[in-house]
Image (cartoon, helix red, strand yellow):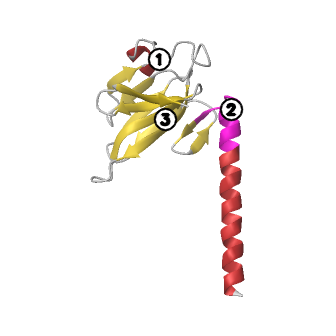
Amino acid sequence: MRLLLLLTLLLLSNYITMAQTEYLSVAIRTGKGVVINDKMVTKPPYILTDTTAGTKYIINRKRTTIKAVDSNGKKMWKKDPQKSLGMSRFKNYRTNNPYIEYIKFSIDNETNKPSKLSIRYNNSQFGHVHLKDGTFHFEGQD
């Protein structure tokens, strides 16, 4: 009986996870928001907060720039990852105006603290942004 209950709970858990994943993918495909740390945010402000340092990473309304603000409210940097690459890799790849649709901290295995921001654009290009200076590193495209 316990085994049956355990299997039922496991199947139900998987079903809920699949439903959440489908919701996120539909919301992304329709441009309805930004996935921030695996949670859909459908209306601005789009903010990702590093709770260990108190730094906030804010995506603008057009979802093209990221601004870092320290725990005292002072702007650390503001970057447009596309422009930092000279638009050469982004130009006319699936869309003329790519925007950020997904952002998440990458956690350092040794310190267990955020080390960079992983971002993905609606045209399937992706990369990471260094937390200290906003430098963008293009990693590829699907």
Pick the residue in front: 139 or 58: 139
Give the residue number, with chain letter if any, for mark 1: 89
Where residue 114 appears, as percent x and y from the top left, is 35, 45
The answer to whether 12 appears left or right of 49 in the picture is: right
> Looking at the image, is mark 3 or mark 2 earlier in the sequence?
2
Give the residue number, with chain letter if any, for mark 3: 47
**Which residue sits furthest bottom?**
1
Give the residue number, with chain letter if any, for mark 2: 29
Q: Which residues lie in the magenta part?
A: 23-34
Q: Quadrant of the N terminus?
A: bottom right
Where residue 41 appears, as percent x and y from the top left, is 60, 38
Where residue 77 appears, as percent x and y from the top left, is 33, 23
- Residue type, label 2: Arg
- Residue type, label 3: Ile
Residue 28 colored in magenta in the image? yes
Q: Quadrant of the C terminus?
A: top right
**Residue in the image at 52% along x and 12% along y:** 91
- Residue type, label 1: Arg
Q: Counting other residues with Cα less than 10 Å from the Cα at mark 3, is it few (<14), some (14-19), or many (20 or more)?
A: some
Tell me where residue 4 sits by quadrant.
bottom right
**CA separation, marks 1 and 3?**
26 Å
**Above or below for 25 versus 129:** below
**Residue in the image at 62% along x and 17% along y:** 95
Instruction: Please tell me whether mark 3 or mark 2 is closer to you in this view.
Output: 2
Contact between marks 3 and 2 (CB within 8 A): the answer is no
Residue 68 colored in magenta in the image? no
Q: What numbered label is drawn on residue 122?
A: none
Q: Counting other residues with Cα less than 10 Å from the Cα at mark 1, is it few (<14), some (14-19), or many (20 or more)?
A: some
**Residue in the image at 70% along x and 44% along y:** 23
Q: Counting other residues with Cα less than 10 Å from the Cα at mark 2, is it few (<14), some (14-19), or many (20 or more)?
A: few
**CA separation, marks 3 and 2?**
20 Å
Instruction: Please tell me whether mark 2 or mark 1 is closer to you in this view.
Output: 1
